[in-house]
Image: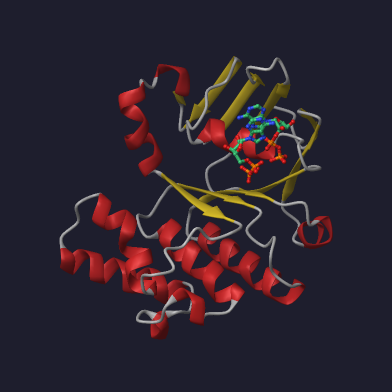
Amino acid sequence: MITFERVSKRYEEGHDALKEVSFQIERDDLVFLTGHSGAGKSTLMRLIMLMDRATRGKVLIDGRDLATVPSRGVPAHRRDIGVVFQNHQLLFDRPVFDNVALPLVIRGYDYREVGRRVRASLDKVGLLSKERAMPLTLSGGEQQRVGIARAVVCKPKILLADEPTGNLDPDLSAEIMQLFEEFNRVGVTILIASHDLALISRLRHRILTLKDGRLVTGGAL
Ligand code: ADP
Ligand code: ADP
């Protein structure tokens, strides 16, 4: 589903953020991505989302070489990928419902379909009763679950999460990871960047470790 073949990424200043990175993530896998700050985790995710392009090597998503996707094809590419951020990036002046509905509204779904899908998504993250709540009245864990509901509302094949538990205490972090495992069980391919080694080691999924842009564990094609 996600294949990196000797991928390097060099930013303009000449610094290699990724060096010859190779790995393969199968459909239905849940994989963690770890490494120190600056190791290249965000860069790797940005390449998958086509927020940036590899300098060398190949990135294939669902068999498609991303080098063949022209700029105008980027929005369609991103449609199949849900993204969860550490800081939620919620609209704080809009209720939960509107936040989760946003990707559907952008895609032009009619309002009945929006309502149906938003409620299905909120139900999956256990927040059906909060659809009218404003984000600031929710706990940190609940806000993160709103972010996850928004990421899955378009039923993406791939879910990327960048430090999704970065601001949460250990119990809430474990709950959020369980939620990702549930989405994984219904067929979503998931890549989660996290530096919380204690938490991710316990969960027994494959771990890719980056060190200064090189993949040091979990890679072998
Ligand atoms: P991580 O997510 O593991 O903290 P990043 O992928 O954000 O790592 O960063 C990897 C390296 O690339 C760091 O040295 C960072 O400063 C650098 N970097 C990231 N984005 C850019 C950019 N847009 N321009 C230049 N350097 C960047
Ligand atoms: P994150 O790692 O969560 O994306 P950052 O604060 O590292 O957050 O990066 C925010 C933005 O700045 C990103 O678009 C990233 O690519 C860019 N960036 C990160 N490091 C550098 C850098 N050294 N030089 C220029 N841009 C950078």
In the rendered view, tell whether residue 155 sits above or below residue 177.
above
The residue lying at 78 percent from left, 62 percent from top is 199
Q: Can you give x and y, in whole percent of width and height, for residue 73 in the image?
A: 32, 27
The residue lying at 55 percent from left, 35 percent from top is 46
Q: Is residue 134 left or right of residue 76?
A: right
The quadrant the C terminus occupies is: top right
The residue lying at 58 percent from left, 79 percent from top is 139
Q: Quadrant of residue 24?
A: top right
Q: Can you give x and y, in whole percent of width and height, for residue 171 in the image?
A: 73, 76
Q: Which scheme is used to colour this image of the protein? A: secondary structure
Q: Can you give x and y, in whole percent of width and height, for residue 190 in the image?
A: 57, 50
Q: Is residue 195 left or right of residue 48?
A: right
Q: Quadrant of residue 102?
A: bottom left
Q: Is residue 5 visible?
A: yes
Q: Is residue 128 left or right of residue 110?
A: right
The residue lying at 78 percent from left, 42 percent from top is 37
In the rendered view, tell whether residue 36 sits above or below residue 170.
above
Q: Is residue 18 visible?
A: no
In the rendered view, tell whether residue 144 sits above or below residue 15.
below
Seen from the viewer's position, the closer of residues 203 and 102 is 102
Q: Can you give x and y, in whole percent of width and height, for residue 169 in the image?
A: 74, 73
In which quadrant of this rendering is ligand 1 seen? top right
